[in-house]
Amino acid sequence: MEKLGEFTIENIEDCTYGAIVFDPETETDDGIEIVHWCGYWHTPDQEDLDDLKKELNEDDQFGLVGISDRLEYILVDGDTFREYLLKCN
């Protein structure tokens, strides 16, 4: 299998789909905080989401291990994904 690079804010123009992860407990009148995001070159399927959830639950580099069970995920197309991320940056 070909090893693909990772999406960064600088190269997200190529992604066609994205998963935006948020913690519903951070919701305020101003909105909700995105705690993680993941770009995809293909429509993410259940296996992709399961892999992402597992990684966030097990890899403490993301700082989400203790709260991973309450995180929520939104799947969006590439244009919407870029729009969300550029607003947050």
Image (cartoon, rainbow, N blue to C red):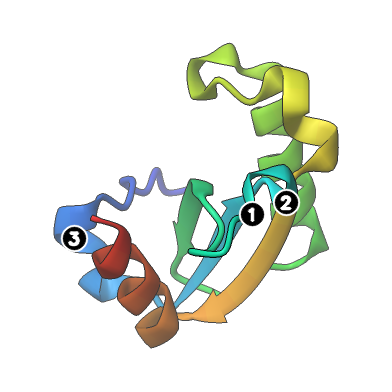
- Left/right of residue 74 with respect to residue 12 in the rendered view: right
Residue 27 circle label: 1
First of labels 1, 3 by sequence position: 3
Q: Residues within 10 Å of mark 2 (few under 14, many from 20)?
A: few
Residue 39 circle label: none
Query: Element at badge 1?
Result: loop
Query: Badge 3 is on which residue?
Result: 11
Label 1 vs label 3: CA separation? 28 Å
**Rendered residue at 25%/50% (across/down):** 8
Label 2 vs label 1: CA separation? 6 Å
Query: Element at badge 2?
Result: helix
The quadrant in which residue 87 appears is bottom left
Q: Nearer the viewer, residue 58 or 51?
A: 58
The quadrant in which residue 86 appears is bottom left
Viewer-side label of 1, 3: 1
Label 2 vs label 3: CA separation? 28 Å
- Mark 2 and mark 1 in contact? Answer it, CB < 8 Å: yes
Viewer-side label of 2, 3: 2
Query: Badge 2 is on which residue?
Result: 24
Asked whether residue 39 is in view, the answer is yes
